[in-house]
Image (tube, helix red, strand yellow):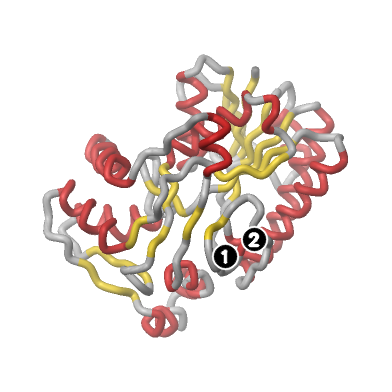
Amino acid sequence: MKHTILGAGGSIGNALTYTLLRNGEEVRLVSREIHPLEGTEYLKGDLISYADTLEGVKRSDVVYLCVGLPYDVKIWKERWPKIIRNTIDACKEVGAKLIFFDNVYMYGKVDGIMTEETVYNPISRKGEVRAEIAELLEEEMQKNELDVIIARAADLYGPFGTPVTSVPYMMVFDRLMHGKTAQWMADVNQPHSYTYIPDCAEGLYLLAKENTAWNQIWHLPTHSPAIDGRTFIELASREIGVKPKYMILSKSLMRFGKLFSKIAGEAYEMLYQNEYPYHFDSSKFNRHFDYVPVDYEEGIRKTIQWINQK
């Protein structure tokens, strides 16, 4: 099989690339910037362009859409619908299957556990965009013209993460490893699920190879129960060998910060995810594939080891 990763070069794209290569698969990487990796074919392309998208997916069996747009709702509103439409149409034209790597913003504030059956109830502008593009893909599932999977993950951590793609990397690992105080948003005592990046990559590959998985929504393997911020920081501090010092970025502090920082402004509307329990359930995947996600203690240890080896 030929596997093409659209939006290659990010944390999920890189982790997935190595998973595919390790399994002897043929891999093509497509992105706006060239990220060549030994053993892969790579192609420069902008997914806003249908011509570029079509060229990127030619002769592909499975296409993974792993794009990470700048964290700006204006850019999301403008680009995401175009990228989804171009990818759908291009995959149809060449006869490729499509796996979309998604998050949970469309669920909004969930009272309980997030599953594949959770109703879309976005309470943020970015959540509204994610709901819109998910609904486009779900419409395709009903048409029988294209095989589609929506594969969702919780917030990410683990090897291949970066300060741009992983909040725990930016606020916990990076700060503690540079002698700084860790940071946590809103409430350090709330439980919050995190998906280990290598589990994401392995999950995407298993879905691609499973004939019965198509035209469904899947939550990628994520350890349960969720972990609270205090425990996460303590585990990271112990592995790094420093005291578990942290400060809380409160809602009022974030509200004030958004007056001066665009990034803080974009993060503020998503703060509900840290104010309330955030439980992400991957039981459907775990049962189907007999898969055991990496637990937080092991995941944090492997993350620190990976950062130290960079």
> Which quarter of the picture shows residue 4?
top right
Q: Residue at x 39, y 85 (%)?
A: 252
Image coords of residue 201 (percent x, y): 49, 34
Image coords of residue 150 (percent x, y): 66, 44
Q: Residue at x 48, y 58 (%)?
A: 279
Determine which residue is flagged by label 2.
76
Mark 1 nearby-residue class (10 Å; few <14, some 14–19, many ≥20): some
Q: Residue furthest top?
A: 24
Secondary structure of the residue carrying tag 1 is loop
Dot 2 amino acid type: Trp
Q: Residue at x 59, y 61 (%)?
A: 105
Callout 1–callout 2 Cβ contact below 8 Å: yes
Tell me if residue 46 can be seen. Answer: no
> Which quarter of the picture shows residue 253?
bottom left
Q: Quarter of the image containing the N terminus? A: top right
What numbered label is drawn on residue 276?
Answer: none
Image coords of residue 114 (percent x, y): 56, 57
Determine which residue is flagged by label 1.
72
Q: Residue at x 79, y 36 (%)?
A: 90
